[in-house]
Image: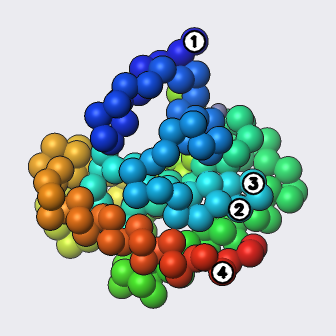
């Protein structure tokens, strides 16, 4: 079954799996690739203009953590840690929320959502995540935020460019 996806720059594309479309390069995420390793692909979903938000997707079309091979697992955890280090070092991000669910409509991907003080009005922990993302999507989609987001992507990409896993 295919789904219609509207990209950050307004194009509509029909894909079977958004994660496959992005990790294979069929869809270029706005801001480009942050880092690509043998088994994983990291990028930002520009629909949610939060600086330093990173999505880490597997290249293989799988849904669950227990489907990762030993190789993928080792690469995954060290890549996530390296991205986390870059978020702290380059962007001063002190805390990150990690979100990943196995009943997703597209395949295995982890959200790394930085925690900023403006998010406090939406509460803390898991119940704040959806309101925070919706607020970003509906109220922060302007030039200024977009500029910050693109700048952050560039900083993360540069910081990670020599990472080889
Ligand atoms: Zn897929």
Q: CA distance from mark 4 to mark 2?
A: 11 Å
Residue closest to the far top = 1
Q: Which residue is mark 4?
A: 162
**In this rendering, is residue 89 above or below 141?**
below
| Residue 109, disc | none
Tell me how many marks there are. 4
Measure the C-alpha gap from mark 3 to mark 4.
16 Å
What's the residue at 70%, 72% (across, down)?
78
Badge 4 element: loop
* Mark 4 nearby-residue class (10 Å; few <14, some 14–19, many ≥20): few
Q: Which mark is residue 39?
A: 3
Residue holding disc 1: 1
Residue for badge 2: 37
Residue in the picture at 68% in, 55% down: 40
Question: Residue 50 location in percent, x, y?
Answer: 29, 60
Q: Give the CA distance from mark 4 to mark 1.
A: 38 Å
Label 4 or label 2, whichever comes before in sequence order: 2
On screen, residue 6 above or below 150: above
> Is the CB of mark 1 within 8 Å of ligand 1?
no
Would you call the spot at circle 1 few (<14 residues within 10 Å), some (14-19), or many (20 or more)? few
Q: Is mark 4 within 8 Å of ligand 1?
A: no
Are circles 2 and 1 on residues that touch, CB within 8 Å? no
Task: Tell me if residue 146 can be seen.
Answer: yes
Q: Position of residue 95 (x, y in %)?
A: 39, 75
Rendering quarter of residue 130: top left
As drawn, is 138 to the left or to the right of 94?
left
Considering only order in the chain, which callout, 1 or 4, is on the residue closer to the N terminus? Answer: 1
Q: Are dots 3 and 2 in contact, CB under 8 Å?
A: yes
Spatial CA span between label 3 and label 1: 25 Å
- Residue 106, how many percent across, how many down? 56, 32
Mark toward the start of the polypeptide (2 vs 1): 1
């Amino acid at each position: 079954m295919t789904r219609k996806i509207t990209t950050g720059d307004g194009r509509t594309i029909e894909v079977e799996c958004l994660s496959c479309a992005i990790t294979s390069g069929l869809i270029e995420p706005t801001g480009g690739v942050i880092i690509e390793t043998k088994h994983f692909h990291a990028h930002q979903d520009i629909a949610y203009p939060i600086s330093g938000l990173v999505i880490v997707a597997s290249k293989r079309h799988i849904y669950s953590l227990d489907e990762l091979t030993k190789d993928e697992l080792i690469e995954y955890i060290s890549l996530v840690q390296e991205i986390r280090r870059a978020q702290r070092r380059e962007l001063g991000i002190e805390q990150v929320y990690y979100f990943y669910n196995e009943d997703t409509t597209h395949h295995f991907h982890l959200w790394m959502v930085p925690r900023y003080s403006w998010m406090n009005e939406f509460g803390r922990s898991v119940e704040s995540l959806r309101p925070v993302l919706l607020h970003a999507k509906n109220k922060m989609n302007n030039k200024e935020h977009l500029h910050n987001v693109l700048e952050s992507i560039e900083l993360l990409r540069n910081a990670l460019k020599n990472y080889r896993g």
